[in-house]
Image (spheres, helix red, strand yellow):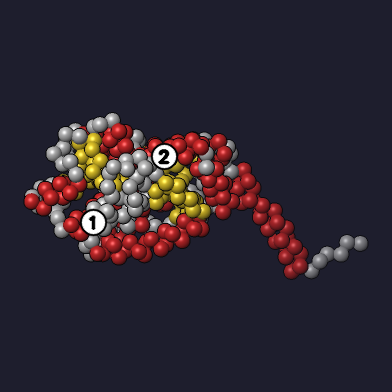
Amino acid sequence: MTIKAPYPLRRGLLLLTAAAALAPWGALQAQSYPSAKAVTLVVPWPPGGSTDRHLRALSEIASKHLGQQIVIENKPGGGGTLGPGTMALTAKPDGYTIAQFPLGMLRIPHMQKTQWHPLNDFSFIIGVSGYTFGFTVRADSPYKTFNEYIEAARKQPGQINYGSTGTGSSPHLLMEELAGNAKVELTHVPFKGNADLQQALLGGHVMAQSDASGWDKFVDGGQMRLLVTFGEERTKRWPQVPTAKELGYGVVSTSPYGLVGPKGMDPAVVKALHDAYKKAMEDPKHIELLDQLNQAMWYRNGDDYRKWATETYAKDKALIERLGLAAK
C-alpha cells in the first residue's frame, strides 16, 4: 500500500527538489567559465599609448592562466570614461566583458552628470598599477626647464598651452592644481589619448604635454625633453629630472588603476579573472615591462580595490570643488 504525504508536505518536497536541481546551475556556469568565448578587455585609450601597451601585454600573459584568449577593444573618449561607462550600461555581468578603470572614473561624476555610478555600477576585480606622470616639450622647444615654461605663462597669461589625455583626466587635473599653486594661467588642449597627444606635440600643434610615460621612447630617442615628473621622488630611469614637489609646486600624482566588470558578476568569475591577472602581474615579463614604462605595481584584491575607490571618490570631490570644476 502506498501512503501519500499530505499535500502541503508533498508541495514542499517538490520545491526543495526543484531548488536542489537549479542551485548548481550558477555554480556550473562559474565552473565552466571562460569556456564559451574570448574575454574582451575594454581599454579606454587609443592603441599605442602606455596604458594600451601595458594592458595588452599583461592580458596576453593572463590569457594563459585563464585558459581563454583575452582580446583588447580600444574605446577612447571622455577622459578615459567612455569605455568603462559604456560597458557598465550595456555589458552582461558574465565575465566576458571587462574594462580598465582609470582614476577619472572617480572624478568625472563630480564634474558632470553621468548615466553610471562609479561605485554602484561596477564589480571590482583587481588593482594593477599606477602611472608615472611627466611634462614634456619638443626637443627644439625654447623651454629648457619647467620653471622657464611656468615663467613664460606668467608673462603671457593664457598664451602658453599644453595637451593632456582629456578634461578631468589625472594629467589635466594635476596641471590645473599646479597652475593654481603657481598662480599662472595655462590653456588646456584635451586629446582622446596619449598616442594622439604624442603626435600633436611632435607635430608642433601644442607647446607641451602632461601625460603618463608614453613619452618614454621619445625622450630616450631625443625627440622630446622631459622637464618634470610628478611622483614623490625622482624616477630611476630619469634621475636628472626634478619632481614638481621638489620644485615647490606642491603636486604629487600617480593615478592608480585596475580592472572592473559590470555590477552583479558571480564572485567565482571575479575570482577566476583576479587569479589569472595576479599570476600575470607576477610574471617576470610583466615586471620588466613595468620597468620600461617606469610604472610601479599596485596590487589590490577586489574588496580592497573597492574600498580604495570608495575613499578616493569622497576625497576627490573636495579636490574638484577646490579647483572650481564641480558641476553646477
Q: Which residue has dot 1 on it? A: 248
In the rendered view, tell whether residue 326 sits above or below residue 244. below
- Element under disc 2: helix
| The N terminus - image quarter | bottom right
- Residue 267 position in % (x across, y down): 56, 54
Q: Amino acid at mark 2?
A: Asp
Left or right? Give the position of 175 relative to 148. right
Do callouts 1 and 2 mark residues in contact (Cβ within 8 Å)? no
- Residue 43 position in % (x across, y down): 39, 42
Would you identify the image quadrant in which residue 245 lies? bottom left
Q: Tell me if mark 2 has few (under 14), some (14-19) or many (20+) residues whose alpha carbon lies within 10 angstroms of its own.
A: some
Residue drawn where x is 42% and y is 40% of the image: 290
Tag of residue 73:
none
Q: Residue furthest left?
A: 155
Q: Earlier in the sequence, mark 1 or mark 2?
A: 1
| The C terminus - image quarter | bottom left
Residue drawn where x is 35% and y is 35% of the image: 47
Residue drawn where x is 11% and y is 53% of the image: 154
Left or right? Give the position of 11 relative to 77. right
In the rendered view, tell whether residue 320 sits above or below residue 135. below
In the rendered view, tell whether residue 321 sits above or below residue 176. below
Q: Residue furthest top?
A: 221
* Mark 1 vs mark 2, CA separation in Å: 27 Å
Would you identify the image quadrant in which residue 312 lies? bottom left
Q: Which residue has dot 2 on it? A: 291
Residue 115 in view (yes/no)? no
Residue drawn where x is 32% and y is 57% of the image: 107
- Residue 317 position in % (x across, y down): 31, 63
Q: Amino acid at mark 1?
A: Gly
Q: Nearer the viewer, residue 210 or 272?
A: 210
